[in-house]
Amino acid sequence: MRILCALTYYRPYTSGLTIYVQRLASALVRRGHSVTVLTSQYDPSLPRHELMDGVRVVRAPVAARISKGVIMPTFGLLANVLAVQHDAMSLHLPQFDAPGLALRGRLLRQPVVLTYHSDLLLPPGLMNRVANHVVDAANVLAGALATRVVAYTQDFADHSPFLRRFHNKIVVIPPPVEVAHASPADISGFRERWNIRGPVIGMAARLAAEKGVEVLLNALPRILSVYPNARVLFAGPYENVLGEEAYARHLAPLFERFRDHWTFLGTLGPSDMATFFPNLDMIVVPSLNSTETFGLVQVEAMLCGTPSVASALPGVRQPVLQTGMGQVVPIGDSAALASAILAILANRDGYVRPRAEVAAKFSTEKTAAMYEDLFRQLGA
């Protein structure tokens, strides 16, 4: 089967969406399919054409930007060429260009499967409000043209205004989750490299407003009153994050206040993430809005025996609720987050479940097999 995937940003850009599509595309290639990713050349230094893990990547040059959005004049021409070379489309929202691709797929009588990853909520400002409405309208049009719409969980599907609109097209497919192998020596080497001694709280995310970083920062005083040597390890992009410069400046005084208890690790590769998770007492996902719909890092951590504390957002709460490995706290509630962290630190073993239980629910191969079955059912 020849599958065309499309999304605005792709690797090496780091986000839950790009990691999802990279894992899915690579797994489909391993299963014998031909996969092309059509995306933006968001960084001019990136090649226009590239082969990554067997996946053909085609990048359209960016002529202009509106916040996190990009304008790509040649995108339509590339879409015309690629659409006729493939049997099915896997489009990933939010994405301004999705309706044009979906229309091409329908005209070619191809299955068009949308995966709805999250809502788009840009920072305040007139231009951002306009961009938000435009992308929302594009998403709705793409949904109307799609053959099926994939949601991560029924929980999010039931609460998302977008997904409820297309309830008769919804297919629930859990997201792809995988963790590289790490030896005991690798794990202890990570601990020594970062001088880990006391309780460790982990976050793995971009430094972005929707991630709720300030919720954890505001919970630290109470945590430190009980565990004075507690420390946060933050894995992910934190400098010059696209569209988040003002947010970083806003948090700078808090980072300075807790500089002895907060360490930025930067973006970690798969092997480093596999040593990061086992060195945590827990992972924290204090996300604030529906731009976060699951939190892949929770399950990655759980596969390494690490519990999670997650906000009670639809979808985001599901890994904890489905596995029992952690606690769910009210959205934006620093006091509740501190209480949950202290409870897990006091009885961490009580929240740990066997790896096999978690792996039975979530894996990249399971996700790829479900997409493969869906495309076959739709007649690709």
Image (spheres, rainbow, N blue to C red):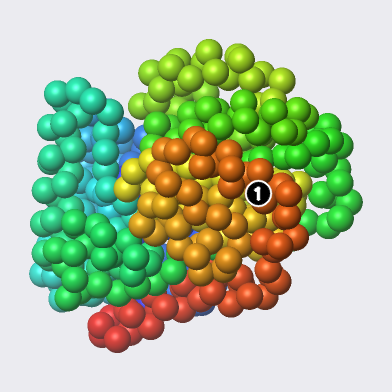
| Residue depicted at 42% across the width and 78% down the height | 370
Measured as percent of width and height from the top left, residue 340 is found at 59, 47
Measured as percent of width and height from the top left, residue 80 is found at 19, 57
Q: Nearer the viewer, residue 20 or 63?
A: 20
For the C terminus, the image quarter is bottom left
Considering only vertical position in the picture, is 35 above or below 265? below
Q: Is residue 316 left or right of residue 276?
A: left
For the N terminus, the image quarter is bottom left
Considering only vertical position in the picture, is 22 above or below 217? below
Measured as percent of width and height from the top left, residue 181 is found at 74, 60
Q: Is residue 348 left or right of residue 332?
A: right
| Residue depicted at 43% across the width and 46% down the height | 330
Q: Secondary structure at mark 1?
A: helix
Q: Nearer the viewer, residue 337 or 41?
A: 337
Residue farthest to the right? Answer: 185
| Residue depicted at 58% across the width and 19% down the height | 255
Q: Quadrant of residue 56?
A: bottom left
Q: Is residue 223 left or right of residue 279?
A: left
Is residue 49 at least partly visible in the picture?
Answer: no
Q: Nearer the viewer, residue 338 or 125?
A: 338
Judging by the rendered image, the residue that carries numbered circle 1 is: 343
Q: Quadrant of residue 172?
A: bottom left
Q: Amino acid at mark 1?
A: Ala
Structural crowding at the residue carrying mark 1, measured as other residues with C-alpha within 10 Å and reported as few (<14), some (14–19) or many (≥20): few
| Residue depicted at 18% across the width and 64% down the height | 164
Considering only vertical position in the picture, is 249 above or below 82? above
Is residue 156 at least partly visible in the picture?
Answer: yes
Measured as percent of width and height from the top left, residue 367 is found at 46, 72
